[in-house]
Image: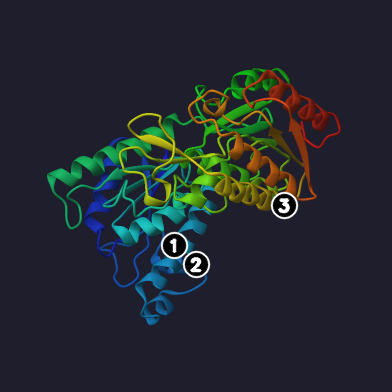
Amino acid sequence: MTKTILIAGTYDTKDDELSYLAGVIRAQGGRVLSMDVSVLGDPSRPADISKHEVAEAGGSTIAEAIDSGDENLAMQIMARGAAAMALELHRAGRIGGVIVLGGTMGTDLALDLCAALPLGVPKYIVSTVAFSPLLPPDRLPGDVQMILWAGGLYGLNSICKAALSQAAGAVLGAARAVEAPGHDRPLIGMTSFGKTVLRYMVRLKPELEARGFEVAVFHATGMGGRAFESLAAQGAFAAVMDFAPQEVSNHLFGGLSAGADRMTNAGRRGIPQLVAPGCYDLVDLVGWKSLPDALSGRPAHAHNRLLTSAVLNPDERRQVARAICSRLGGAAAPVTLFLPLQGCNEWDRPGADLHDAEGLAAFCDEIRTTCPGNVTLRELDAHINDDAFCEAVLAVFDGWVADRTIAV
């Protein structure tokens, strides 16, 4: 149960705080490996990994970072090096988790360092800007934990010690308790929303598990899509069922984006893709804010106090169709795109509050027009929540397993 935690930070300016973190971890029975990512100054005592080693791993030197005269460029050098070294330490089995401390500068570096580590490695960032809109979704690793460093901009005090001690205990406890993702069964990555709007996962998950696969369902509201894309980029999936690509719509129209690379990483890694446009017609927005001017005056669904979905008009749906087809066009493995002609979420059925026959027809027409040659288009005279949709998906999936498109 003895675990080693990597502590990274600017030891020239945060020496006391970083040393306090180390002391709490050691007092709880953990070990510490310290990494100095400073540029200008030096720590009071040598770190286990010096700033010179970090800069070298970033393809540069401390002297070059200083001579650049640009603090942003200098910190990016250190971020590259810190990320590379953290991944190397993980692969060598030398660390069980990581914690990084910083203000905006240290947090910028921390995001790169944590993003370099696979999902399942405990990663904590103690930051003066935790939960801030400064942090774009596409910079956030899928399983990162953030703790607000309240009252900790300069020097130790009882307020910031409360945050630091919790963070130290959290990362050590996580390193001891974590059950890292296994590889005993091939993994299917699926995107969806709750059962009130999309229901296919209820049928598909047990069917896929009975076939010997593990299924991970990602809630496609920004951060879920980030985790999905991160794992796809790592090649973690045997196949994906990306049936809720609404984050593409969100990215186009100012909603809860999962980043510009949404719906691209599986294709780049050569992972077979089964795709459907679940909730393509909606843009998810922060529910406690007013609708932006560009989306005001149109139907919307207040899902709860946190989340409101605005409905796209026909022209906007054509834009979404083109974006989906463009992303799928670069795939290096087979892609089947299912097009449910009767609707793509429970709220758009005939008679439901968000039904728009003209908008659905415009989207389907644009999909037919722009679907790339590498994508097999399967039109279904069904709704995405009908059993017929799941049956069509399973038929293609079983065929891909039989012909070894999907590795078992």
Residue sitting at x 52%, y 70%: 59
Instruction: Tell me the distance, in whole angstroms, between the alpha carbons under discs 1 and 2.
Output: 7 Å
Q: Which mark is residue 321?
A: none
Residue extending farthest left: 158
Question: Sequence-wise, which precedes: disc 3 or disc 1?
Answer: 1
Instruction: Report x, y in % for residue 73.
Output: 41, 72
- What residue does disc 3 label? 329
Label 1 secondary element:
helix
Count of marks overlaid on the render: 3
Q: Splitting the image into 4 quarters, where does residue 35 fall?
A: bottom left
Amino acid at pointer 2: Gly
Question: Sequence-wise, which precedes: disc 2 or disc 3?
Answer: 2
Instruction: Report x, y in % for residue 335.
Output: 75, 42
- Which mark's residue is nearer the viewer, 2 or 3? 3
Q: Splitting the image into 4 quarters, where does residue 256 fall?
A: top left
Amino acid at pointer 3: Gly
Instruction: Report x, y in % for residue 341.
Output: 68, 31
Q: How is the image coloured?
A: rainbow
Residue sitting at x 62%, y 23%: 385
- What residue does disc 2 label? 58
- Which mark's residue is nearer the viewer, 3 or 1? 3
Q: Are marks 1 and 2 in contact (CB under 8 Å)?
A: yes
